[in-house]
Structure formats: structure tokens, C-alpha cells
Image (cartoon, rainbow, N blue to C red):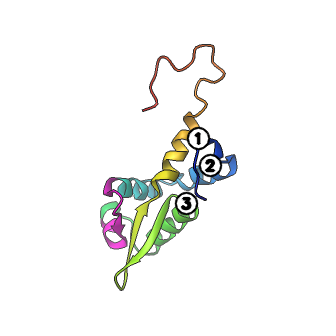
Amino acid sequence: MKINKPEDLDLTIAAARFAALGSEQRLAVLRSLVRAGPEGLSIGELGTRTGVTGSTLTHHMKILASAGLVTQAKQGRSIICAAIAYEEVQGLSEFLLNECCADSPSPCGDHDHG
């Protein structure tokens, strides 16, 4: 599901990714991973920071991973480390803002997209 440009992100993939963020707990998990940076967090630490633990956290991570928003990799013998898929999250933002004001008589002069 890797994307290179916002126009490459198809509506179906974008909808699936936004749907994956449609849970307060999943959004909290993703936000914690963004705050943690590219090193990510162990599942245990992620659970501690979000208050989402056990099978519920595993369920949410599976949905976020299926949507291409997080990646998981085993580190050591038993700790699974989760890190954010920054390009995909950036792609969602660009998907929304890529055509900002395209149909407006006054193009994007009064606001910044960051």
C-alpha cells in the first residue's frame, strides 16, 4: 500500500485509512506512536501510554496495520515494536489538501497547508 504522491492514493484506500482512524482508541494509539517518533514503542509501553492493553490493543494495531498506517516488527525475543508509517499518514493529509480551493474563484491565498 505504499504511495508516492497524493494523487496516487485512490479513494478506496483513503476511505479505508480514514475508517481505521474512526475510533478514539485507535486515534490515541496512532497519536502516541507519532509522539514516540520513528523508533516507535513496544506494545507494553504503547499500552501504558494509551490505557489500551491486551487483546484490545492487538485488535486496534491489526486494524491500523491493515490500513497501512503503522508497521510492526519483532525486536529481541518477545517485544513487538510498533512504529508509525509516516509517508502514509502524510499521504492522507495531502489527499485532502492536494486540490484545496481547486473549484474556488479565489485560490488558497488566505490559508496555509503547513
Q: Magenta residues, as a range?
A: 35-48
Q: Which residue is mark 2?
A: 14
Q: Nearer the viewer, residue 49 or 93?
A: 93
Q: Name the residue nearer the viewer: 23 or 92.
A: 92
Residue designated by label 3: 68
Q: CA distance from mark 3 to mark 1?
A: 15 Å
- Answer whether labels 2 and 1 touch (C-beta < 8 Å): yes
Give how far across and how far down residue 59 sits, in percent.
Answer: 51, 70
**Mark 1 belongs to which amino acid?**
Phe
Q: Position of residue 95 (x, y in %)?
A: 58, 40
Pointer 3 with pointer 2, Cβ within 8 A: no
Q: Residue at x 46, y 30 (%)?
A: 113
Q: Circle 1 is placed at which residue position? A: 95
Residue occupying image coordinates x 58% and y 45%: 5
- Give residue 16's position: percent from left, percent from top: 63, 54
Q: Is residue 103 above or below residue 93?
A: above
Secondary element under disc 1, as helix, strand or loop, is helix
At x 52%, y 61%, the residue is: 64
Label 2 to label 1, Cα distance in Å?
A: 8 Å
Dot 1: within a 10 Å radius of its alpha carbon, few (fewer than 14), some, or many (20 or more) residues?
some
